[in-house]
């Protein structure tokens, strides 16, 4: 199924559906094909209705032949009591019970979760895979010292003959010591496995050497890591972090820019940004801005660098996040997108009034007048109303008012002042499908009326989205999912509605729950 793996790299691309259709045409009803298609439907197509049907058919036709599918489906459909009973049963292998425990997660509460992990480990003391899941959990909740004896208890029973598990355990122990500043202990834990040349061990060792003041050794090891794993973004992240720590921003930028394949937005956000935040999050703005400038000088785009800013903001340094975001260059609507990022951080730092004043004086009058679509895209729904003036009527104003109506719906249709403004504007029919769609969102036009206006692909994309939006507002999630899928399947990727439908489907996919449960939770 290498084709499937290739398809997953293109989530959101309008050509994806064609690739999926060709792949499906070569499938049949065998279980392995259903498993692959169910995965594709959920994580790539974001089609929750299709995903639920496929996974349900697997569970019914081949119960427990695919334990991962079974436990996923039980969580997806909200069968938590059954999951809990399965967790308590010794009939299932430790790996399956660990998977169940991961599905139950926070529902158990921290103490019950710890007891369940400890019971699993007691049943399978030599199983590093099970034990590592507990270590990962303790790391997520920042209980680093609590994780140390969990790891050392396994290491007392195993040596190098355990292969990669031994390397992973040693590296995990080093990481726990590193995270609490015990760098000497961290080096003692990892030094024994550096010669394995496993990427995680090499990277952690390089960072620890740097903290121990052995900068030259750290750099040598970091360079060796990149040479051995040139395609691995995590390897380049380590070497860049070492250079950033030493103020060698140009070298850090060159390391990242020299990746054989362009580093994707996701890797900038989730792989590189944590290292950037670790180095600059509590430091001075000039250093961070110098690192930004070096990356820009190497040709890294502003929207890649944009992915580094949220980590700074999440660390509470909104002043630095604002200065970084406002330093990114762009033109046209892209400039407004970046200015909205800066606005959010200035709002968190200085307050809403000052941030709004800054935005109005920074963005051109032309962009402010056309800002509704970008503000809606960025889910700044108040700005859809507040940034520009009265749109007027007719022409471009029809779309501006549609954005106001959609923003009002997205905010729960609770603002009576805005409801009255919309009711006044939309009280009478007028030419144009944007006006009709605004009336539809207010309940003044029927679904059949607006669907008749879908006379070309662009209008089909737009109309399907707003029909889906109203369905979602009315908690008809199955209908909304279908309409958002129609929006995406038009392939009109230049339309905002195409992206907004993708975003809605992605939000739901990330919830890990069925459409029926989404509707129930919203009621």
Image: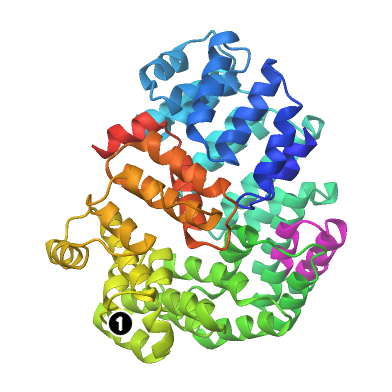
The quarter of the picture where residue 209 lies is bottom right
Q: Is residue 501 above or below residue 426?
A: above
Residue that carries the numbered disc 1 in the rendered image: 356
Q: Is residue 523 left or right of residue 260?
A: left
Nearer to the camera, 142 or 346: 346
Look at the image and give the residue range highlighted in magenta. 217-239
- Residue 225 part of the magenta segment: yes
How many numbered discs? 1
Residue 482, horizontal then vertical, whole percent? 46, 38
Q: In this rendering, does residue 511 appear at all?
A: no
What residue is shown at x 17% (from left), y 56% (from top)? Answer: 414
What residue is shown at x 40% (from left), y 78% (from top)? Answer: 370
Residue 329, horizontal then vertical, whole percent? 57, 84
Q: Is residue 430 left or right of residue 123?
A: left
Q: Residues within 10 Å of mark 1 (few under 14, many from 20)?
A: some
Residue 39, horizontal then vertical, whole percent? 61, 32
Point out the image quarter for the C terminus. Answer: top left
Point out the image quarter for the N terminus. Answer: top right
Secondary structure that dominates the magenta span = helix
């Amino acid at each position: 199924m290498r084709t499937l793996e290739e398809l997953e790299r293109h989530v959101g691309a309008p050509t994806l559906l064609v690739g999926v259709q060709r792949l499906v045409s070569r499938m049949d009803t065998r279980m392995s094909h259903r498993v692959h298609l169910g995965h594709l439907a959920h994580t790539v197509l974001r089609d929750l209705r299709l995903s639920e049907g496929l996974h349900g058919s697997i569970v019914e036709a081949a119960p427990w032949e695919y334990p991962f599918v079974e436990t996923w489906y039980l969580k997806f459909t909200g069968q938590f009591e059954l999951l809990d009973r399965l967790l308590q049963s010794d009939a299932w292998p430790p790996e399956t019970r660990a998977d169940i425990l991961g599905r139950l997660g926070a529902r158990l509460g921290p103490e019950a979760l710890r007891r369940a992990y400890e019971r699993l480990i007691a049943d399978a003391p030599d199983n590093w895979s099970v034990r590592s899941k507990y270590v990962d959990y303790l790391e997520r909740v920042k209980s680093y010292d609590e994780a140390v004896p969990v790891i050392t208890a396994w290491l007392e029973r195993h040596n190098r003959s355990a292969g990669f598990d031994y390397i992973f355990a040693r590296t995990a122990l080093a990481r726990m010591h590193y995270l609490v500043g015990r760098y000497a202990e961290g080096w003692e834990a990892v030094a024994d496995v550096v010669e394995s040349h496993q990427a995680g061990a090499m990277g952690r060792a390089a960072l620890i050497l740097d903290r121990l003041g052995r900068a030259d050794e750290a750099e040598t090891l970091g360079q060796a890591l990149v040479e051995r794993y040139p395609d691995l973004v995590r390897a380049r992240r380590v070497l860049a972090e070492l250079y950033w720590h030493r103020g060698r921003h140009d070298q850090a930028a060159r390391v990242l820019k020299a990746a054989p394949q362009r580093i994707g937005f996701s890797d900038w956000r989730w792989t590189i940004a944590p290292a950037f935040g670790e180095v600059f999050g509590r430091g001075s703005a000039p250093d961070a801005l110098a690192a930004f400038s070096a990356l820009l000088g190497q040709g890294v785009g502003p929207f890649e660098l944009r992915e580094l800013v949220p980590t700074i903001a999440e660390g509470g340094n909104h002043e630095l996040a604002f200065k970084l975001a406002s330093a990114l260059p762009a033109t046209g609507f892209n400039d407004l997108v970046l200015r909205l990022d800066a606005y959010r951080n200035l709002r968190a730092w200085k307050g809403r009034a000052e941030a709004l004043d800054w935005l109005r004086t920074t963005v051109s009058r032309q962009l402010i007048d056309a800002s509704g679509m970008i503000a809606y895209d960025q889910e700044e729904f108040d700005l859809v109303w507040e940034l520009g003036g009265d749109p007027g009527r007719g022409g471009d104003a029809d779309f501006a008012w549609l954005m106001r109506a959609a923003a009002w719906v997205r905010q729960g249709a609770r603002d009576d002042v805005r409801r009255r403004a919309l009711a006044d504007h939309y009280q009478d029919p007028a030419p144009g499908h944007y006006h009709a769609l605004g009336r539809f969102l207010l309940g003044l036009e029927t679904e059949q009326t607006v669907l008749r206006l879908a006379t070309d692909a662009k209008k089909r994309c737009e109309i399907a989205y707003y029909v889906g939006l109203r369905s979602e507002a009315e908690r008809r999630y199955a209908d909304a999912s279908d309409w958002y899928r129609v929006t995406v399947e038009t392939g009109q990727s230049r339309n905002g509605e195409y992206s907004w439908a993708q975003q809605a489907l992605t939000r739901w996919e990330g919830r890990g729950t069925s459409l029926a449960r989404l509707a129930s939770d919203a009621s």
